Image (cartoon, grey):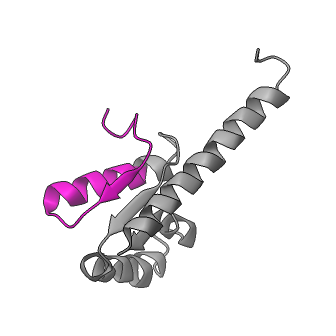
Amino acid sequence: MFVKYAEAFVIFPGGFGTMDELFESLCLIQTHKVRNFPVVLFGSEYWGGLVDWLRGTMAVEGKISQKDLDLMLVTDSPEEARDHIVQRYERSKEMREGVRSSDPARPE
């Protein structure tokens, strides 16, 4: 339920619980079980090794795709995190409104 209603995740360095929430959310987004929302990993020094492993091992072996890696933004900047979330929210809102206004079966 935590993931179902999320607008974005900003994930800070943590332990097993943090990893569990991160990978659970990515898996649900990847498999289209929940809406694709921004996932921001805050702290490039902390997350860098994991992202390098995902890219250099999992993606290389075909376990995940490059597109899957694009589900995450790694940053050290609060402003970049904010801008990423706001841009993704606005783009999602435009898409929802575009679908609503272009679908004659849906009332405005």
Above/below status of 14 relative to 32: below
Q: How many marks?
A: 0
Nearest the eye: 64 or 94: 94
Q: Is residue 7 magenta?
A: yes
Q: Is residue 65 left or right of residue 90?
A: left
Q: Residue lying furthest front in this view? A: 79
| x, y percent for residue 13 | 21, 67
Q: Residue 83: x percent and y percent?
A: 51, 61
Q: Please identify the quadrant where the N terminus is shown.
A: top left
x%, y% of residue 56?
41, 85
Horizontal side of 59 relative to 41 (left or right) equals right
**Which residue is at 53% across, 53% downward?**
86
In the current view of this chain or complex, which residue is farthest to the left?
A: 15
Residue visible at 50% across and 74% down?
A: 62
**Between 73 and 68, the one nearer to me in the picture:** 73
Task: Indicate yes or no whether the magenta region holds residue 14.
Answer: yes
Which residues are the magenta region? 1-27
Of 74 and 64, nearer the camera is 74
Q: Is residue 21 left or right of residue 81?
A: left
Q: Position of residue 67 (x, y in %)?
A: 57, 67
Quadrant of the drawing holding the C terminus: top right
Residue at 45% x, 79% y: name it: 61
Q: Is residue 52 above or below residue 78?
A: below
Is 50 situated left or right of 26 in this image?
Answer: left
Eyeballing the image, is 67 above or below 44?
above
Up/down of 72 relative to 93, above or below? below
Name which residue lies at 32% across and 79% down.
Answer: 44
